Image (cartoon, coloured by chain):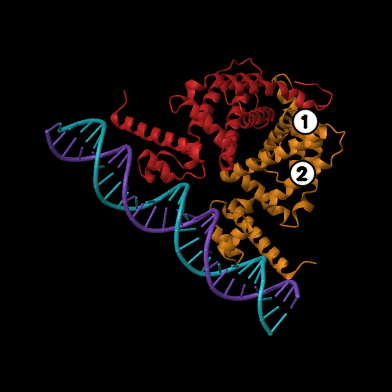
Chain colours: A orange, B red, C purple, D cyan
Amino acid sequence: METLRERKKQRTREALLRAALELFTTRGYEHTTVDEIAEAADVSQRTFFRYFAGKEDVAFAVQGMTEEHFVAAVRARPAGEAPMEALRQAVLEGWDAIRETVESAVPVELYLRMYRTIESTPALLAAHLRRSAATEETIARLLAEREGVDVDADPRPRLAVAVFGGVIRVTERQWCTGDDFSLEAIRQLTASHLDQVGPALTGNWRTTEDR
Amino acid sequence: METLRERKKQRTREALLRAALELFTTRGYEHTTVDEIAEAADVSQRTFFRYFAGKEDVAFAVQGMTEEHFVAAVRARPAGEAPMEALRQAVLEGWDAIRETVESAVPVELYLRMYRTIESTPALLAAHLRRSAATEETIARLLAEREGVDVDADPRPRLAVAVFGGVIRVTERQWCTGDDFSLEAIRQLTASHLDQVGPALTGNWRTTEDR
DNA sequence: TTGTCAACTGTCAGAGGCTGTCACTAGCCT
DNA sequence: AGGCTAGTGACAGCCTCTGACAGTTGACAA
C-alpha cells in the first residue's frame, strides 16, 4: 500500500486538476489564472508548477490518458489485420472504454466539457494538434514495425496515419460544434466518417449520391 | 505612388520582420526576446507590438503569404477538375511560384530556413498546425462551393481536405528532417507522396512492392 | 509658410505565465 | 527521539503582452 506522503501528493494533484478543468470549462481557459487554480486547490502558485509543467499541461492531463489508451489499443490489435482497420477498431474501442479510462481522474462529463473547451480555444487547439502529431508519429512507427517496413524509407505508414488523423480531427470538430455531445454520437460519427474517406477521395461528389 | 509616411512604416515593418527571422533562425525562437528584435530593428519594444500581434505573429508573416497564394491558386483551378487534382496542382504551382511570392518581403533562403525552424520548435509547430487547420477550413468551403454540395451537411469536402492536409504535413516534415533543402526536393516529395496515398490506404504493405 | 490634425512612436506601469532560490515543515526511517 | 528528505510557501525576477499618456513627425489646407 502507498504511503501517507504519496496519498497526500495524489490528493493535491487531483485537487489542482479538478479545480483547473472546472475553471477552464466555466469561465474559459484564457480568463483563468494559475493563481486562481492554486487558490481553488488551496495551495500556493509555486506548488501548482511543481505538479504541472504549466497551464497548458494541466489542460491536457486527461487527454493524455486517452491518447495512451489509444496507442495501447493499436498495439493490441491482431497482427494480421490491415493497418487502417486496426486504427479504426482501436479508436472505436477507445470511445467504448472511455469511462474506465477517465473516471479514475475526473468525471467523464467534465472530460467531455474540457474536450469542447480545447476545440474552441485557439491556444489549446494548437497544443492539441501538436500533441496529435506526436501521437501520430508513435502510431506510424508502430504500424511500420507491425507490417515489417522501414518507417524512414517507406512513406506509407506515416501517410496512412496522417490520413486517419485527419479524419479523426474532422470528426472531433463536427462533434464539438454539433449539439449531440453524447459518447454514442462521436462513436457513430467516427465510424461514418471513416466509411466516407473513399468516396471523398474519388471526387465526382455531384453524381455520387450520397451517404 | 505611396506617401513618405507609408514608406517609413513599410521600412520599419520589414526591418522588424528581417531582424526577427534572422534571430529566430540563428539563435532559436525561444532564445530570442522581443526586446532583442526591437533593438535589432532600432525601435522600441512597444513599436514591435504595433506592427505584429506578438512574437508568434512575426514568425508566420511570410508563411501567411504562401498560404494566401495557395488558396488563390485553388480558387483559380478550372471548375471541371476533380477536387483532389485541383489541390495537387495548386500546391505544386505554389512551390513553383515561391520566389515571386516571398522575395518581396525576405530572401527565399531565409524563408526556407524559417520553415525548418518552425518544424523543429514545438511552440511554432503547434501554431503552424493551428493555422493549417484554419486554411483547411477555407479550402473545404471553397471545394464545397465548387462542387455544389453543402459543407455542413456533407462531410466529404472536409474529409478530402483533411486527407490532403495530412499528406502535406508528412511531406513538410520529411523535407525538414532530410538533408536536401532545395525547392525541387520538396516539390518532388509532394508529388510522390500524393501518388502514394492510394497504396498507403489499401494496406498489405508487405506484398505491395514498392514505390 | 505656417498652423492644425492625425498618425506614429517612446516611456512608463502593470498583469500574467513561468523559474530559481531558500528556508521551513511534515512525513519517513533508523 | 532525532536525522533525513520530499514537499511546500514566500519572494524575487524574467519575459510576453497591454493600456495610458505624452512627445514627435508627416500630411494637408489656409
Q: Are marks 1 and 2 on the same chain?
A: yes
Q: On the image, numbered disc 1 is attached to which residue? A: A195
Q: Chain of mark 2?
A: A
In the depicted view, which residue is nearer to us: B24 or D30?
A: B24
The crowd level at tag 2 (other Cα within 10 Å; few <14, some 14-19, many 20+) is many
Can residue A189 be seen in the rendering of this structure?
no
Q: Which mark is residue A70?
A: 2
Secondary structure of the residue carrying numbered label 2:
helix
The crowd level at tag 1 (other Cα within 10 Å; few <14, some 14-19, many 20+) is few
Image: A50 above or below B145 = below
Please tell me which residue is depicted at 36% across the width and 44% down the height of the picture.
Answer: B44
Return the disc, 1 or 2, that comes first in the chain's sequence: 2
Query: Is there CB contact under 8 Å for labels 1 and 2?
Result: no
Please tell me which residue is depicted at 35% across the width and 41% down the height of the picture.
Answer: B43
Q: Which mark is residue A49?
A: none
User: Where residue A185 sits in the image (x, y, percent)?
Assistant: 74, 42
Observer-side mark, 1 or 2, equals 2
Choose top left, top right, bottom left or bottom right for residue B81.
Answer: top right
Amino acid at pointer 1 = Asp
Image: B42 above or below C24 = above
Does residue B189 appear left or right of residue D20 in this picture?
right
Secondary structure of the residue carrying numbered label 1:
helix
Please tell me which residue is depicted at 76% across the width and 34% down the height of the picture.
Answer: A192
User: Where residue B41 sits in the image (x, y, percent)?
Assistant: 38, 38
For the C terminus of chain A, give its image quadrant.
top right
Amino acid at pointer 2 = Phe
